[in-house]
Image (tube, grey):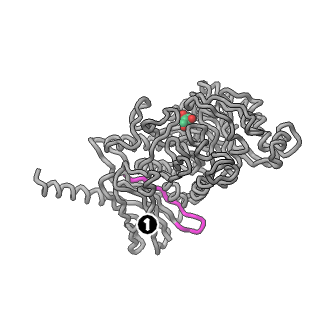
Amino acid sequence: MKTTTLLLITLLAATVARAQDRLVIQADQGDVTISKHIYGHFSEHLGHCIYGGYWVGEDSPIPNTRGIRNDVVQALKAISVPNLRWPGGCFADEYHWMDGIGDRASRPKMVNTHWGGVVEDNSFGTHEFLDLCEQIGCEPYICGNVGSGSVEEMSKWVEYITFDGESPMANLRRANGREKPWKVRFWGVGNENWGCGGEMSADFYADQYRRYAVYCRNYGDNRLYKIAGGPNSADYNWTETLMREAGGRMQGLSLHYYTVPKTWGDKGSATRFDEAEYFTTMERTWVMEELITRHSTIMDRHDPRKRVALVPDEWGAWYNVEPGTNPGFLFQQNTLRDALLAGVNLNIFNNHADRVRMANIAQTINVLQSVIFTEGEKMMLTPTYWVYRLYKVHHDATLLPVALTAAPYRLDGREIAAVSVSASRDAAGKVHLSLVNLDPKNARVIETELRGINAKKVTGETLTAANLTDHNTFTSPDVVAAKPFNGARLNKGALSITLPPKSIVVLEIE
Ligand code: AHR
């Protein structure tokens, strides 16, 4: 085919795609709040998430406050982390909290059997975690041990942390230096109890859940928000059983789903992938939409008033570890692809905010889809971090109804949605729009109708890079970082948005 003909066909195709991309935003409607807790994080005793990530110890030359890195706390404050899930993950179901209190030098050591078989010296325990949450200004989300623990152990942990009166556990806490109890709302009753958390059947776990939950008491005005260990991806029977047998005794049901581009044996590289692998990654990340819709449908049958939240408290991309690193440490790079993936998932959660009221990306520092990397005294922000910075505008804002018609992203005869969007109105009346263009080659012009708002001004920021594989390093930390966006035009109340290829755009409309 002659080059000119090819060019004409490409231009025509682009015009057709443009003509189809249309968005309507109902700016004066909406009755659901996007809980800021959708923007939660997850940190496990795994690799260098806790040790080296947060915890360096009081004697470290790395600037710290009571052993916790100041640079990391500052970075997490800047994205207003609302809650932090800890101590696992699989680690939670073999963690015995009493090993992590009292004089640090005398704390017993254990083997972290799930994650690299390394020695866990328990120097980061309950007091250190709750101090970390206070420094960040976020709510703790503690996951208790059902798999290898006991009802008594979990019950005493709640008492130790939250009871203000005279009791063996409250007195032990005081002896360990903390007079006043902490406030802890989010409480996970086990983790992946269908797998590493005890390989239980749904019926068996439902009974266990009820038994453990009874003894997790509300002391004083501390009210626990109990989150049951939920399904693995598309295990709808788990959700059905849990909701039927224990739905009335929980405030949340977790959901775990990781985006794996290839297979669990060879997950694919974090930085070396072609467009076909990128396409599959995004195709699999869109599965989150279906999972949430279908689990919610089951929950709706048992809980039509949506009292119980669906909590995807482990989600994100999971690739092969970086060559030469400990396979048990799950360290992977983070590229523009990860940022786009995060943007899509967070838009999905926003759009399901009536049922999804909390979520936690795995995992904050140096593990899986991290927002921060550390190496000795150095710290850097990943592309995923920037998504959390940009999407902060949605925290506790009112979800706005949107209707999007956009041409799909096609590759090799397959197609997925190319554009992802969610919109909200904040307390000051400003409208925010987060858009993701997954198409790596074509810009998208989105003709947007703004209903119910007399828009006068639009500003924005964007996150993109030259290549999908681009990422930040300690020597080049700003390859993928948010920049001002000038591709939105207001004309007589209508908004035309030109989304660059493979980009995220967040707009503020006043
Ligand atoms: O996030 C890594 C692991 O993935 C968690 O420990 C576990 O819950 C899940 O399988």
Residue 315 is left or right of residue 182, and the answer is left
Residue 487 is left or right of residue 347, and the answer is left
| Quadrant field for ligand 1 | top right
Seen from the viewer's position, the closer of residues 484 and 413 is: 484
Residue 319, given in percent of the width and then of the height, sits at 44, 38
Whether the residue carrying mark 1 lies under 8 Å from ligand 1 is answered with: no
Work out whether residue 32 can be spotted. Answer: no
Work out whether residue 73 can be spotted. Answer: yes
Residue 70 is left or right of residue 179, and the answer is left
Magenta stretch encompasses residue 448: no
Magenta stretch, residue numbers: 417-430
Q: Quadrant of residue 126?
A: top right
Q: Secondary structure at mark 1?
A: strand
The residue that appears at 53% across and 44% down in the rendered structure is 366
Seen from the viewer's position, the closer of residues 489 and 110 is: 110
Residue farthest to the right, as pictured? 166
Residue 46, given in percent of the width and then of the height, sits at 57, 37
Residue 153, given in percent of the width and then of the height, sits at 75, 31
Q: Is residue 11 above or below residue 161?
A: below
- Dot 1 corresponds to which residue? 484
The residue that appears at 44% across and 53% down in the rendered structure is 475
Q: Quadrant of residue 272?
A: top left
Residue 211, given in percent of the width and then of the height, sits at 73, 30
The residue that appears at 23% across and 55% down in the rendered structure is 13
Magenta stretch encompasses residue 423: yes
Seen from the viewer's position, the closer of residues 121 and 27 is: 121
**Tag 1: Cα neighbours inside 10 Å, few (<14), some, or many (≥20)?**
few
Residue 40 is left or right of residue 105, and the answer is left
Q: Amino acid at mark 1?
A: Pro
Q: Is residue 338 above or below residue 206?
A: below
The residue that appears at 53% across and 51% down in the rendered structure is 378
